[in-house]
């Protein structure tokens, strides 16, 4: 029973995707956040789009910090890492996008004093097309923040 509401059609036109304007279907993994260091902290999670239409993460917010920014870490030729703020993060149909240290990540700016190891707080993710999703982030020691689960879904059917 899938009627295409005109809003979705519009959104698909705006996205100009190669994916024929299907419907995105997002799920978000359990989230973790690093213990804050010098006024910032990363949120680690994965977003899977099992639908047949592309989507994009356009914002994230939480009461536990002043703001949450979408960052991409890039390493230049001298091995210097810099973080570039992104307007959005693409969530292509059929793919899982991982937000984690060293790549695409979510960075809380000026987290609360409440953001301490063992605590949890809600984070709301906002998307270009899908409804917002709220997940709980568990605060862990920075060193425990490595990879959520070993690589299992990095299969990229020859994009
Ligand atoms: Cu960052």
Image (cartoon, grey):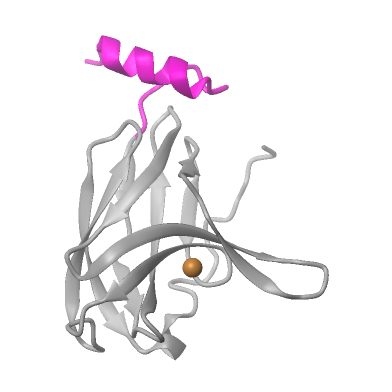
Question: In the rendered view of the protein, which quadrant contains the N terminus?
Answer: top left
Residue 107 lies, with reference to residue 12, above or below; the image says below
Q: Give the residue at x 55% y 66%.
A: 151
Residue 22 lies, with reference to residue 147, above or below; the image says above
Q: Give the residue at x 28% y 10%.
A: 6
Q: Position of residue 139 (x, y in %)?
A: 27, 81
Is 95 magenta? The answer is: no
Residue 53 lies, with reference to residue 85, above or below; the image says above
Badge count: 0
Q: Position of residue 127 (x, y in %)?
A: 33, 40
Q: Which residues are magenta?
A: 1-24
Foreground of the two, 81 or 159: 81
Q: Give the residue at x 46% y 42%.
A: 91
Question: In the rendered view of the protein, which quadrant contains the C terminus?
Answer: top right
Residue 61 image-quadrant placement: bottom left
Residue 121 image-quadrant placement: bottom left
Is 4 magenta? The answer is: yes
* Residue 21 in sight: no
Please state if 144 lies on the left or on the right of 92 as rendered: left
* Residue 46 in sight: yes
Q: Position of residue 53 (x, y in %)?
A: 43, 27
Q: Give the residue at x 49% y 75%.
A: 147
Foreground of the two, 149 or 142: 142
Residue 56 image-quadrant placement: top left
């Amino acid at each position: 029973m899938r009627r295409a509401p005109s809003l979705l059609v519009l959104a698909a036109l705006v996205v100009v995707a190669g994916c024929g304007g299907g419907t995105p279907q997002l799920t978000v993994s359990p989230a973790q956040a690093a213990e804050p260091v010098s006024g910032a902290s990363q949120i680690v999670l994965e977003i899977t789009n099992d639908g047949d239409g592309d989507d994009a993460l356009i914002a994230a917010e939480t009461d536990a910090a002043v703001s949450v920014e979408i960052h991409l870490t890039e390493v230049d030729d001298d091995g210097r890492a810099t973080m570039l703020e992104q307007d959005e993060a693409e969530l292509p149909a059929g793919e899982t996008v991982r937000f984690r240290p060293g790549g695409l990540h979510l960075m809380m700016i000026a987290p609360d004093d409440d953001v301490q190891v063992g605590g949890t707080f809600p984070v709301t993710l906002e998307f270009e097309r899908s409804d917002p999703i709220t997940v709980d982030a568990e605060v862990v020691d920075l060193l425990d923040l490595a990879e959520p689960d070993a690589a299992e879904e990095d299969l990229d059917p020859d994009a």
